[in-house]
Image: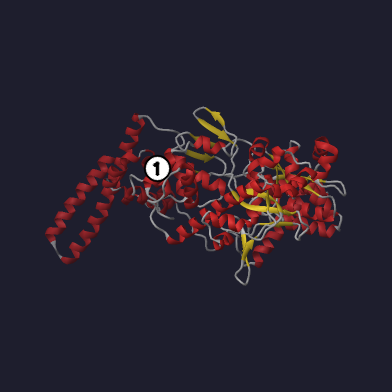
């Protein structure tokens, strides 16, 4: 992990209210002195995600945890350095005091440059749309029935039918063509010539969850192929990670716990215009697991909207499988032949589409019905492959029951078949995952050591003012597990630093769990302090006892009778002090 000046992190945190930041993404409800919501990091129906106004978040379900910077990084898919950099830019905090890391700095500059250039490009395209040269794009927008409000909310624009218009615009603002090409806005051919990637097209900006433009989709208005052209991957954009319109739809999705997922840019815009503001779209590729997980952070139920032809049904089958494998529910909306979302809404209105949603088929039933059109053997093969691929035991158990019911198989028979196939697969792979062989056994002594370590560290985490005193009393010698020693080492070496910048994810989770109950009373702290000191004293005495026994053995071997007598006396004193403590 990159090292940061603690003052920089503290300055950023001091300007952030964790409740207000989390509210950008999650519908929080007050619960006493804290805030609750369904967790944005796993699928659930009840609110187990809690935000403490003192700066921490924690989920009792998936145990996601951390501070305000961790939340920002996790919800936006950023590493710590990237998240800190974005927050610093947003809050106006200077990061010059960050300790140098050349490779990370180069990546950060590339990301920062890409964000700035995409922002400039978005403004440039929007200005073009309103200019005389943008009439062709404005006419197309009118022909599609898109309202000015939707055009503005999604930031639509127009790329001039010119090979170097954006290149000149960016160059005038200090960005060389090579940097713009690396960001995916320009193209550099084999001869080294650089030119605009998008020309004569209606521009659809793609935003990240912070509202920054990170890429573009573009529809031709001049008849040039291809009809749609998307940004190439860049330092800020990976095609399979993002969804078109999710930034605009996220609040409605989080509120309704339901999302509409479709394929086209214009379809997303039309859905929003007709009141379906929880709609978003895939970006020119098949649905990916990462996109599903990203949606799963906001909701647990998806409507898949596809064309009713063969290609649409295949896409719906693949997407349904993927969504079900991630533990979400889905329903499939198949459009009438010859209709797309936009045409249906324009000709028949919102009520017609709402009726299609009401009659949407459950995703699992759709999969079984679609596969069942082939042969019984192929359907059974699909069931085994699908169920065997489920990693989460809870999802698997519930889906087995549904599958058995829908295909007319006895549930117990189906479970036995799956268990048999799992055993066969394990045997074929040499017994991997069978739970035997080389796994270390946990002894009662190691379990007791872990318990003691966690009790000691819990006191230290909840009462960091005692760190120096604990260190002087031999806390380090009292800890026996790598986890406790690692966390304690960070607390000792950086006692005044913002500890969260130094911790691993398990350490952060443990830290937050220790502080969930709020501060103890002074009386409780005093009692625990006495217990901890007594334990540390016993540890020290037992260490001295072991040392004395070893020294006594050496003195006896060397025939040093005076040293033997001294050590015997010391041993009696140690044993007496241990007896007193018992």
Quadrant of the snapshot with the C terminus: top left
Q: Position of residue 529 (x, y in %)?
A: 32, 37
Left or right: 72, with 574 as reference point: right
Location of mark 1 (residue): 10
Left or right: 280, with 80 as reference point: right
Farthest residue to the front: give it: 132
Residue positioned 63% across, 71% down in the render:
190
Between 488 and 52, the one nearer to me in the picture: 52
Quadrant of the snapshot with the N terminus: bottom left
Farthest residue to the top: give it: 32
Between 240 and 431, the one nearer to me in the picture: 240
Left or right: 403, with 568 as reference point: right
Farthest residue to the bottom: give it: 191
Left or right: 544, with 463 as reference point: left
Between 12 and 537, the one nearer to me in the picture: 12
Residue positioned 85% across, 47% down in the render:
339
Mark 1 Cα-neighbour bin, 10 Å: few <14, some 14–19, many ≥20: few
Residue positioned 29% across, 41% down in the render:
533
| Helix, strand or loop for disc 1 | helix
Q: Position of residue 439 (x, y in %)?
A: 52, 60
Q: Position of residue 515 (x, y in %)?
A: 44, 38
Q: How is the image coloured?
A: secondary structure
Q: Position of residue 470 (x, y in %)?
A: 30, 44
Above or below — where is 567 with respect to 330?
Answer: below
């Amino acid at each position: 992990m990159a090292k940061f000046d603690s003052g920089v992190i503290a300055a950023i945190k001091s300007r952030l209210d964790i409740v207000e930041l989390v509210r950008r993404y999650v519908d929080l409800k007050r619960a006493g002195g804290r805030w609750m919501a369904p967790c944005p990091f796993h699928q659930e129906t009840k609110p187990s995600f809690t935000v403490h106004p003192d700066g921490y978040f924690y989920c009792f379900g998936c145990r996601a945890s951390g501070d305000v910077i961790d939340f920002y990084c996790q919800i936006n898919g950023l590493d710590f350095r990237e998240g800190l950099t974005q927050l610093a830019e947003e809050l106006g905090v200077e990061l010059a005091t960050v300790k140098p890391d050349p490779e990370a700095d180069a990546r950060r500059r590339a990301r920062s440059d890409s964000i700035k250039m995409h922002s400039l490009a978005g403004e440039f395209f929007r200005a073009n749309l309103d200019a005389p040269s943008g009439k062709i794009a404005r006419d197309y927008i009118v022909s599609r029935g898109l309202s000015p409000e939707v055009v503005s909310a999604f930031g639509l624009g127009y790329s001039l039918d010119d090979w170097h218009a954006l290149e000149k615009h960016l160059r005038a603002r200090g960005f060389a063509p090579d940097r713009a090409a690396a960001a995916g806005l320009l193209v550099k051919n084999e001869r080294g010539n650089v030119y605009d990637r998008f020309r004569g097209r209606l521009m659809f900006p793609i935003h990240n969850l912070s509202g920054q433009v990170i890429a573009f989709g573009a529809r031709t208005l001049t008849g040039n192929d291809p009809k749609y052209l998307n940004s190439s991957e860049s330092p800020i954009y990976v095609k399979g990670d993002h969804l078109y319109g999710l930034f605009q739809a996220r609040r409605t999705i989080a509120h309704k716990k339901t999302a509409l997922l479709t394929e086209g840019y214009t379809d997303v815009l039309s859905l929003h215009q007709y009141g379906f503001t929880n709609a978003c779209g895939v970006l020119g590729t098949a649905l990916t697991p990462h996109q599903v997980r990203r949606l799963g952070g906001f909701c647990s139920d998806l409507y898949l909207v596809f064309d009713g032809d063969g290609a649409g049904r295949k896409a719906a089958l693949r997407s349904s499988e993927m969504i079900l494998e991630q533990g979400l529910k889905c329903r499939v909306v198949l459009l009438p032949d010859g209709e797309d979302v936009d045409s249906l809404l324009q000709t028949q209105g919102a009520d017609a589409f709402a009726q299609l949603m009401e009659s949407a088929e459950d995703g699992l039933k759709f999969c079984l019905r679609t596969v069942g059109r082939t042969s019984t053997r192929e359907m059974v093969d699909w069931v085994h492959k699908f169920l065997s691929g489920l990693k989460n035991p809870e999802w698997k158990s519930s889906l087995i029951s549904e599958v058995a019911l829908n295909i007319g198989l006895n549930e117990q028979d189906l479970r036995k078949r799956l268990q048999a196939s799992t055993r066969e697969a394990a045997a074929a792979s040499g017994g991997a995952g069978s739970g035997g062989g080389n796994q270390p056994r946990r002894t009662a002594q190691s379990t007791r050591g872990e318990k003691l370590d966690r009790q000691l560290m819990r006191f230290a985490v909840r009462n960091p003012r005692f760190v120096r005193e604990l260190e002087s009393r031999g806390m380090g010698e009292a800890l026996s597990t790598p986890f406790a020693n690692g966390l304690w080492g960070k607390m000792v070496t950086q006692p005044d630093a913002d500890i969260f910048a130094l911790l691993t994810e398990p350490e952060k989770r443990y830290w937050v769990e220790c502080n969930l109950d709020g501060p103890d009373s002074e009386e409780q702290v005093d009692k625990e302090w006495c217990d901890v000191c007594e334990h540390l004293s016993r540890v020290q005495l037992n260490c001295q006892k072991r040392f004395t026994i070893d020294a006594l053995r050496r003195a006896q071997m060397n025939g040093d009778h005076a040293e033997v007598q001294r050590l015997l006396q010391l041993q009696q004193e140690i044993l007496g002090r241990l007896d007193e403590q018992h």
